[in-house]
Image (cartoon, helix red, strand yellow):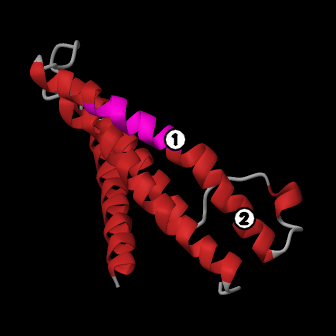
């Protein structure tokens, strides 16, 4: 039940960010090409929304087992061997890298908050710490999704359940 809520919440956030990104780009294009006007804040908001979408999409893709992998050898293996490879991949690659990025990401975001970092461009967005805080947040979510992914694969390995 908790897993379903987590996955649904993550899906709703990513879909919402996608819709906001589309709307923001639409407004920016209309302003630029119809009214011959442009907003740096809108342009920065485009990459803020896209970055958030991408970062949160990593954990969603891992949760749904829709991430990119090289299937040349993997696809021909048995389900138990695939599960073993997934668990090893989580422990060796996903977990250490995610822990490192989350750990250093907190300092990265906090230092932006401490100095009240703003955009270097005139008319750009303030509160740069908000987008920088998406880095550690997303990788904490990757760790949570990774543990769920590893647990599913552990069940597959031990019991043979899908």
Region of the chain picked out in magenta, as a range: 96-106
Q: Nearer the viewer, residue 92 or 139?
A: 92
The quadrant of the picture occupied by the N terminus is bottom left
- Marks 2,1: beta carbons within 8 A: no
Label 2 vs 1, first from the N-terminus: 2
Q: Residue 95: in sight, yes or no? A: yes
Residue 112, how many percent across, how many down?
19, 22
Question: Which residue is painted at 29% across and 52% down in the image?
Answer: 20
Q: Is residue 117 above or below residue 19?
A: above
Magenta run includes residue 99: yes
Q: Is residue 101 above or below residue 162?
A: above
- Find disc 1 in the rendering and name its residue: 96
Mark 1 burial class by Cα count in 10 Å: few <14, some 14-19, many 20+: few
Element type at mark 2: helix
In this rendering, would 158 be left or right of 55?
right
In this rendering, would 108 be left or right of 148?
left
- Find disc 2 in the rendering and name its residue: 84
Q: Nearer the viewer, residue 146 or 130?
A: 146
The quadrant of the picture occupied by the C terminus is bottom right
Element type at mark 1: helix
Q: Residue 37: in sight, yes or no? A: no
Residue 44, picture quadrant? top left
In this rendering, would 157 be left or right of 119?
right
Residue 70, how many percent across, how many down?
78, 52
Question: Which residue is painted at 66% across and 87% down in the image?
Answer: 161
Q: Is residue 133 above or below residue 57?
A: above
Q: Is residue 63 above or below residue 102?
A: below
């Amino acid at each position: 039940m908790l897993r379903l809520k987590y996955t649904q919440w993550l899906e709703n956030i990513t879909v919402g960010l996608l819709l906001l990104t589309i709307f923001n780009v639409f407004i920016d294009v209309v302003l630029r090409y119809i009214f011959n006007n442009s907003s740096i804040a809108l342009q920065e908001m485009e990459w803020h929304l896209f970055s958030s979408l991408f970062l949160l999409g990593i954990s969603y893709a891992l949760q749904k087992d829709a991430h990119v992998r090289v299937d040349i050898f993997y696809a021909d293996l048995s389900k138990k061997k695939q599960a073993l490879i997934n668990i090893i991949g989580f422990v060796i690659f996903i977990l250490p890298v995610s822990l490192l990025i989350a750990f250093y990401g907190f300092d990265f975001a906090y230092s932006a908050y401490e100095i009240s970092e703003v955009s270097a461009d005139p008319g750009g967005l303030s509160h740069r710490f908000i987008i920088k805080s998406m880095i550690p947040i997303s990788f904490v979510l990757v760790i949570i999704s990774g543990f769920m992914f590893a647990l599913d694969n552990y069940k597959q390995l031990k019991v043979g359940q899908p």
